[in-house]
Image (tube, helix red, strand yellow):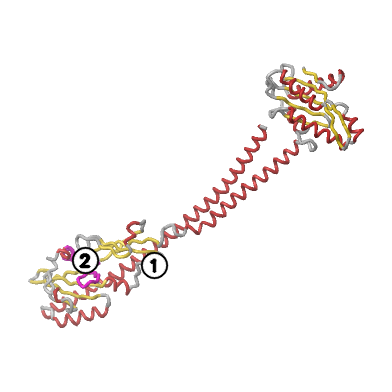
């Protein structure tokens, strides 16, 4: 029983280990595949983000640089006429706005105060507007003057209701041999019109985008796009403009795990193969165990056979006390075979085997080692009285008549017994001693046992 239980446990463990190996393999494949999908998505989003930020920076920088052209107009006008002619300014500003559709306002501000603005319609209130005194603009204007460079402000919400980007550039002229601040040149670009013209989309098939500009009016941050990105794990890139830097955020539509479902077939196949492997291993083990069992079982009586008993005989380990070996012989069984035939003899042996099974305990072993000879191994015996009790049950239960095809057959048993002690300490020694006791008993008479 113990050996069978150990085989059962080994079979289960082997099946589980085989299943875990297959499952681990496919889990690793699934993990690597999904990781590669996420990496590919990351690279796609990163590439699109960088392309978009570069496109915005290049296109917008080009638009903002129009202030340089206006500077040339101002310098030429001051050099020729020592003043700005309103009609010449209007003509030049019209040319600038027509050449770049997204530029919606051109302004000149001598000493930082707006005096010339195009178009005037809708912008009349801006005449006399002091850029250096206005809190929302003064920081950017002053930085432009201090650095003598173009400075960008925006996007900001204009009073007209649209979103604009403003580019400031200072003009310095020589007067009495010294360079003095003349005023500011500025242009305003319609932000959304610019995005439309250069085909910048803040929601693509791949990603959603958000622009973030810090303190565009000195205090308030500006956001344009999908603000839900702020709560997600987004990628960021810089949009570097003259005197200003934006941050452009990107996040794939859905989530970073949106393509993970493509790895499900691998996972499902892994589970199915794991189940198949476990099933096949269990089936192979079961078949192997059946074959092993058949190799050690007597084909007629289904108790253990000579092969199984020989394995015990080969064990040279010393036995502890409380161990007994019984050699059983069916008296005059040859007469049964000769008189009634081998078929009837086989039936008698099967009936006797069932009697033996009911007489012994679960811890004991029953062998048929050939013909009408059986061996029973008794374990964990307390005393010889317990041995005698088992043997008496065997003999009394077997001493009966069997009826086969209306034929009455009576049999009896002779039993030789050997008990583990100092003289016989191995299975082989016990068997030899029990076999000698059996023949000794047969010489004295039948249907009895000899205990030594």
Q: Is residue 209 above or below residue 20?
A: below
The verdict on residue 444 being magenta is no
The verdict on residue 152 being magenta is yes
Residue 182 visible at all: no
Residue reaching furthest to the left: 176
Q: Earlier in the sequence, mark 2 or mark 1?
A: 2
- Residue in view at x 34 percent, y 70 percent: 200
For disc 1, the marked residue is: 204
Between 255 and 190, which is closer to the camera in this rendering?
255
Between 400 and 415, which is closer to the camera in this rendering?
400
Q: How many marks?
A: 2
Percent x, y of residue 354: 77, 32
**Which label sits on residue 151?**
2
Percent x, y of residue 203: 37, 67
Q: Is residue 375 above or below residue 267?
A: above
Label 1 packing within 10 angstroms: few (<14), some (14-19), many (20+): few
Q: What's drawn in magenta, residue-wise?
A: 139-165
């Amino acid at each position: 029983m113990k050996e069978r239980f150990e085989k059962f446990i080994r079979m289960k463990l082997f099946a589980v280990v085989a299943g875990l190996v297959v499952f681990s393999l496919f889990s690793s494949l699934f993990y690597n595949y999904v990781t590669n999908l996420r990496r590919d998505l990351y690279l796609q989003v990163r590439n699109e983000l960088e392309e978009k930020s570069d496109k915005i920076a290049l296109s917008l920088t080009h638009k903002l640089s129009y202030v340089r052209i206006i500077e040339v107009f101002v310098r030429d006008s001051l050099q020729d006429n020592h003043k700005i002619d309103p009609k010449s300014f209007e003509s030049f500003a019209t040319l600038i706005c027509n050449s770049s559709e997204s530029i919606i306002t051109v302004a000149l501000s001598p000493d930082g105060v707006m005096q010339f603005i195009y178009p005037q319609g809708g912008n009349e209130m801006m005449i006399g507007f002091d850029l250096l005194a206005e809190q929302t603009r003064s920081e950017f204007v002053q930085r432009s003057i201090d650095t003598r460079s173009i400075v960008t402000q925006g996007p900001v919400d204009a009073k007209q209701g649209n979103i604009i980007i403003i580019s400031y550039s200072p003009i310095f002229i020589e007067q009495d041999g010294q360079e003095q601040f003349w005023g500011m040149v500025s242009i305003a670009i319609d932000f959304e019109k610019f995005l439309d013209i250069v085909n910048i989309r803040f929601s693509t098939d791949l990603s959603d985008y958000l622009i973030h500009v810090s303190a565009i009016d000195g205090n308030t941050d500006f956001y344009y796009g999908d603000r839900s990105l702020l709560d997600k794990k987004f990628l960021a890139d810089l949009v570097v403009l003259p005197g200003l830097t934006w941050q452009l955020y990107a996040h794939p539509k859905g989530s970073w795990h949106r393509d993970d479902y493509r790895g499900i077939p691998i996972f499902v196949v892994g589970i199915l193969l794991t189940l198949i492997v476990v099933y096949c291993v269990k089936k192979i083990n079961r078949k192997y165990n059946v074959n092993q069992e058949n190799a050690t079982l007597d084909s007629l009586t289904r108790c253990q056979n000579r092969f199984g008993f020989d394995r015990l005989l080969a064990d040279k380990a010393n036995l502890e006390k409380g161990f007994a070996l019984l050699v059983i012989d069916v008296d005059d069984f040859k007469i049964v075979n000769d008189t009634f035939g081998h078929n009837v003899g086989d039936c008698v042996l099967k009936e006797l085997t069932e009697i033996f099974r009911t007489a012994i305990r679960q811890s004991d072993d029953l062998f048929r080692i050939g013909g009408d000879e059986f061996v029973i191994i008794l374990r964990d015996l307390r005393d010889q009285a317990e041995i005698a009790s088992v043997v008496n049950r065997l003999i009394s239960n077997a001493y009966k008549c069997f009826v086969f095809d209306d034929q009455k057959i009576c049999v009896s048993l002779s039993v030789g017994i050997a008990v583990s002690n100092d003289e016989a300490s191995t299975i082989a020694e016990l068997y030899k001693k029990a076999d000698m006791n059996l023949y000794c008993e047969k010489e004295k008479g039948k249907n009895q046992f000899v205990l030594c």
